[in-house]
Amino acid sequence: MNADRDAAVLTYVENAVLNDGEEIVWRGRPSPGACARIDLSRTIFGVIFIIVGGAWTLLVINAHVLMTIPGVVGLFYGVRLSIHTLTYYLKAGRTYYAVTNRRVLIITAGRSISVDSVSGAEIKELRRLEKQDGTGTITFRYKVVVGEDQYGIRRYRSVGFKDGLWGVSDVAGAARAIAVLQPAVEDVKPNAPKE
């Protein structure tokens, strides 16, 4: 079943996504564990909300039913925050990465196949974290502008699932393929501190 889905996704990308003269130079899959760690801080805050909300609810449940509302809201908010880790973990099993000679493709195959395309111009900074076994993560978008207020102050969002290649088995090959897309982007050496 998994090999069938892999072949179907590759066929779909080659027939429906790639433009004339565009070819895949690198492809890979994410590691579920690396994807689960993308937004770990949100999960930690979610667990804190669950603990505080649960404790509040248990402490005031005998006082009055209305006193439990803040605790229940904290529980729901905590679960909502914590669910991201599980979502990313499960999404990794349906995700494929491909780097063509023109762009980076992040392909998600669920009931339907969706493709997110990142052109070389969108890659502002390439960061690579490589382990000794050659696996690692590449992030290529850090400050993603989501809007601007009336005073001209930009609002950013944190790095998410579609802002990098998470836990790939050949991080050096992926970095080389991405560097060709945007020669002006300097590849940060693995695990090297930024100045």
Image (cartoon, rainbow, N blue to C red):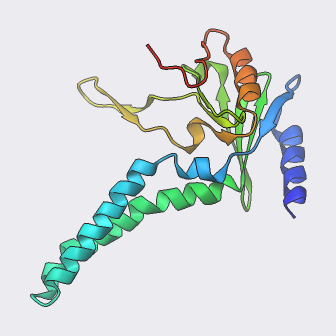
Hey, which residue is sitting farthest top in the picture? 184
Q: Position of residue 103 (x, y in %)?
A: 72, 26
Whether 159 is drawn above or below 125: the answer is: below
In the picture, the quarter occupied by the N terminus is bottom right
Identify which residue, 132 or 168, lies in the foreground: 132
Whether 127 is drawn above or below 34: the answer is: above
The part of the image, by quadrant, that contains residue 106 is top right
Q: Residue at x 51, y 57 (%)?
A: 85
Q: Position of residue 185 (x, y in %)?
A: 60, 13
Q: Residue at x 88, y 22 (%)?
A: 21
Q: Position of residue 20 (x, y in %)?
A: 88, 25
Q: Residue at x 88, y 38 (%)?
A: 14
Whether 43 is drawn above or below 125: the answer is: below
Q: Position of residue 54 (x, y in %)?
A: 27, 75
Left or right relative to 20: residue 59: left
In the picture, the quarter occupied by the C terminus is top left
Whether 187 is drawn above or below 59: the answer is: above
